Amino acid sequence: MMNRKGQLELSANFIVIIVLSIIILVGGLALFYRMIHNAQNTVGKLDDQTEQMIKDMMTDSDRTAVYPTEASITDGDSKLIGIGITNIYNEEVDFTVKLISVTRYTNTNTDWTPMASESPPLGTLSDYNDIISGPISIAPHEKFVKGMFLKMPKDALPGQYTYTIAITNQSNAYGLVQVIVNNK
């Protein structure tokens, strides 16, 4: 009889431990997913001042803008830039932002000479940026600003790089912006 009572107590203790373990696991997972969600919302987010500066750069004649236009990125690092698009049409339009080329220049005494044999200079274009995913829908005559990370591969050669970014709407060219990146 005593042995049976000990088994019931052991079973009850085991069930309590299992329930507490599941509660702690669920709480930990919820905290983990909340941190990931917050990090994703922060990544690619420009500060209000930068966003307003880009919107001010876009006038009726300038339907696209980028800020900063020049940056320094060391090997293996990335830099957040802002891309602005103004929808000049009378209807909502889907725009796509894509890095289309990276050209490396070297300084030859007085001028910068493109290294024509390298396009892209190292790896693939995906090594140089985090592409804005999917099309961006912009309402008629609205301005839209989005962050984009430009990356420098870990084993990139020193020099000046020109990142060329195309903005298209339904496969039609809409704008072209360039960012000069120095890698020393």
Image (spheres, helix red, strand yellow):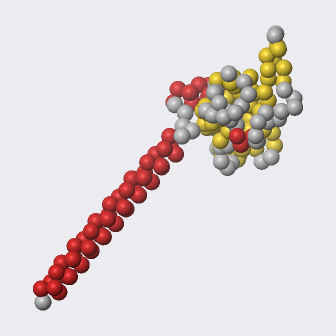
Along the horizontal axis of the image, is 161 left or right of 15?
right
User: Which residue is drawn at the image coordinates 67% and 49% (left, top)?
Assistant: 134
User: Which residue is drawn at the image coordinates 82% and 14% (left, top)?
Assistant: 108
Instruction: Looking at this view, name the residue that lies furthest to the front.
Output: 3
Residue 154 picture location, percent across and down = 66, 34
Q: Nearer the viewer, residue 99 or 119?
A: 119
User: Which residue is drawn at the image coordinates 54% and 37% (left, top)?
Assistant: 45
Image quadrant holding the N terminus, namely: bottom left
- The quarter holding residue 7 reads bottom left
Residue 104 picture location, percent across and down = 78, 27
Looking at the rendered structure, the number of numbered marks drawn on it comes to 0
Determine whether 112 is above or below 161 in the image: above
Image quadrant holding the C terminus, namely: top right
Along the horizontal axis of the image, is 103 left or right of 84?
right
Q: Is residue 177 visible?
A: no
Instruction: Looking at this view, name the residue that lies furthest to the right.
Output: 117
Residue 37 picture location, percent across and down = 48, 49
User: Which residue is drawn at the image coordinates 52% and 31% (left, top)?
Assistant: 47
Q: Nearer the viewer, residue 55 or 49?
A: 49
Q: Nearer the viewer, residue 159 or 65?
A: 159
